[in-house]
Amino acid sequence: MSARTLVAVDWGTSSLRGALIAPDGEVLEERASARGILSVAVGEFPAVFESSYGDWMRPGTLCLISGMAGSRQGWREAPYCACPAGFGDIAAHLEWVEPGRTAIVPGLSMEQDGVPDVMRGEETQVFGALQVLGLNHARLVLPGTHSKWVTVTNHRITDFSTWMTGELYALLRQHSILARTLPPADSADHNDAAFEQGVAYSLRGGGLLHTAFSARTLSLFKRIATDALPSYLSGLVIGEELKCQRLESGDSVVVVGAEALAKKYAQALRQLGVSTQCVDNQATWHGLRAIADTLNTA
């Protein structure tokens, strides 16, 4: 079966992104809006999709949708695909909204120590990053509100874990005693020195429940500038995340995500002697194209 033009959609909690992708993988056009699933009422998903991308859905075009559109609060629930999983497993578990034409990509699930973990959307970014970098084996981190650490072996996701780093930063930044010390808004300029100081203290410290208070005391004793405190706190929480990953000097990690946050993680990983390769959010389009191509050869 020949490859088809693809409408690739990343439908998240707060945003909606789409790309029109040629059979050879070229991105012909992109569109984005704030119509994440939380802004869409029950029953309105088809109408929002039609108004956003309906003109792209010409005869013979395939649409694949990743992200929270497949959650219970989304367009239609796509049951999780159990790990380990590769392209073929995901392609076999697509939730077809319109058979042969529009489908939702399932998320992944796994269990460790009797506790389940899940992801939706990140699996597509992982597979896209593998395509971009030509890798069959990798350790990856996808930073965000809920960061994901992923292990890939023989082009299959064999293990992953979720870390609430971004959400915890926001809680400390806005709703803890630290909020009274920190400036009202983060500076547009990331403070490298303060960030690295936070990472270093976190790596050698006794845990975030202890190290977080240093953001207050360093300010109290005027040992760090007020406008540098957000960068320092960011270093503390990211350092805490890295400390739990059992990384060693000489390891390599692929960082997948938006440029600003990916740069922070790469900076922190360098302090551990870990090399990095960064792939931006275009990884989603590569991943959806690869899943589509798997359907063509199935």
Image (spheres, helix red, strand yellow):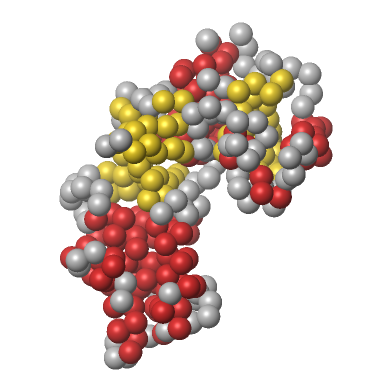
Taking the view exactly as shown, the residue that stands out farthest to the bottom is 221
- Rendered residue at 76%/36% (across/down): 43
User: In the rendered image, which quarter is residue 199 located in?
Assistant: bottom left
Q: Nearer the viewer, residue 110 or 279?
A: 110
Q: Quadrant of residue 153?
A: top left
Residue 226 lies in what quarter of the image?
A: bottom left
Query: Is residue 141 shown left or right of residue 204?
Result: right
Q: Horizontally, is 41 left or right of 151 in the view?
A: right
* 287 vs 14: above or below: above
x then y, percent, for residue 200: 24, 67
x and y percent of residue 116 in the render?
Answer: 38, 37
Please state if 250 lies on the left or on the right of 132 as rendered: left
Foreground residue, 93 or 295? 93
User: Which residue is most to the front?
Assistant: 114
- With respect to residue 6, does 202 lie above or below? below
Residue lying at 42% horizontally and 32% vertically, measured from the top left: 109
The residue at 37%/32% (across/down) is 110
Indicate left or right for 98 with 106 as reference: right
Residue 6 in view, yes or no: no
Residue 120 visible somewhere in the drawing: yes
**What is the total number of numbered labels drawn onto the structure image?**
0
**Which residue is drawn at the image coordinates 27% and 71% (left, top)?**
211
> Can you say which quadrant of the picture contains the N terminus?
top right
From the top left corner, tell me how far across and down residue 114 is, in percent: 30, 35
